[in-house]
Amino acid sequence: MRTFAEDIIATDEYGGVEGLMEKLKVDPKLGLTGEDFVVRGTHFGKNYREPLKARPFYVLFLAALDDFMLKVLMVAAVFSLTFDMILATPDHRSHAWIEGFAIMIAVLIVASVGSFVDWKKEVSFVKSRAKSDEKNVCVVLRNGETETLHHNFLHVGDIINIEYGMAIPVDGVVMNATQLSVDEAAMTGESDEMKKEILQICKSRHADKQAEDQGKPDAANAMLRTHELPSPLILSGTNIAGGEGKMLCVMVGDDSCLGQIIKNLEERPEVTPL
């Protein structure tokens, strides 16, 4: 049985992406060597994502105190303390502060309990996310040998092995495919599994499709079914639904499809008065 590296070397045209590999300075027999990772990271970006961190307790506590009703109670506590101490008779002045102080303590207890519960939830979620993130690895050709790398350390130009059930971490172009199909519902909303093939086959199938549809009365409707044709592109955030193959990484980090979605989610719009 041939190894991943031997399978790549045995491919004469590398899926029709030889020119792209030449532009990206990738040796199809060796993959990336690691000598220019700094330059690649500067020019193309990195796929590294900071690990999720739980917000500190004091941040959640201050956020809880920002509640409108708690603000009203705190203002009421201050007014109660002030006026009770001013208007109290000398005999009652020693304990006139109790009511206002009790309101303030109640506010702090409510904010503290709610903040502590939220903080524990965030800590548990971060631990669960970190444990799940450890499984985000893939097989990559580096220095002529296969390596298992975490998604954070992928670079543009990496030759990645893709197999059934794999979650795609970067955008890429198919180099080799064997009955390869991808579930793109999360990215495109398309429920049907999308077939993936190398560039030459895709171009040939599209040309045959256009020739077949030409002159037909329902040509316009036929063109709408082009999603049934194979595609050489694999988007990040999708999942391999069947088959196996290899892909050349062309987009990482914020420039990838998944990165764009994550970036848009982080940039939350300003809350309107409505």
Image (tube, rainbow, N blue to C red):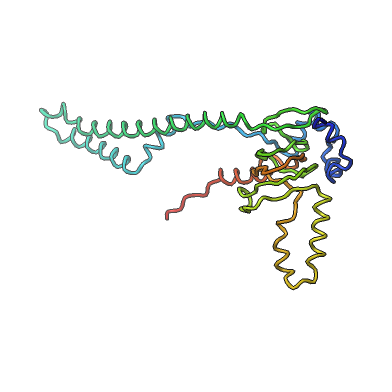
Q: Residue at x 86, y 33 (%)?
A: 29
Position of 136 compared to 128: left or right?
Answer: right
Q: Residue at x 87, y 36 (%)?
A: 10
Residue 240: x and y, percent? 68, 42
Q: Residue at x 32, y 32 (%)?
A: 108
Residue farthest along the front direction in this orientation: 1
Residue 239: x and y, percent? 65, 43
Residue 186: x and y, percent? 60, 48
Q: Residue at x 86, y 39 (%)?
A: 11
Residue farthest along the right direction in this orientation: 12
Total numbered circles = 0
Quarter occupied by the N terminus: top right
Quarter occupied by the C terminus: bottom left
Task: In this rendered view, identify the residue nearer to me: 123 or 39.
Answer: 123
Quarter where residue 170 is shown: top right
Quarter where residue 250 is shown: top right
In this rendering, the answer to whether 54 lies above or below 18 is above
In this rendering, the answer to whether 2 lies above or below 17 is above
Task: In this rendered view, identify the residue nearer to me: 55 or 159.
Answer: 159
Residue farthest along the bottom direction in this orientation: 217
Task: In this rendered view, identify the residue nearer to me: 37 or 160.
Answer: 160
Task: In this rendered view, identify the residue nearer to me: 164 or 203.
Answer: 164
Position of 65 compared to 151: left or right?
Answer: left
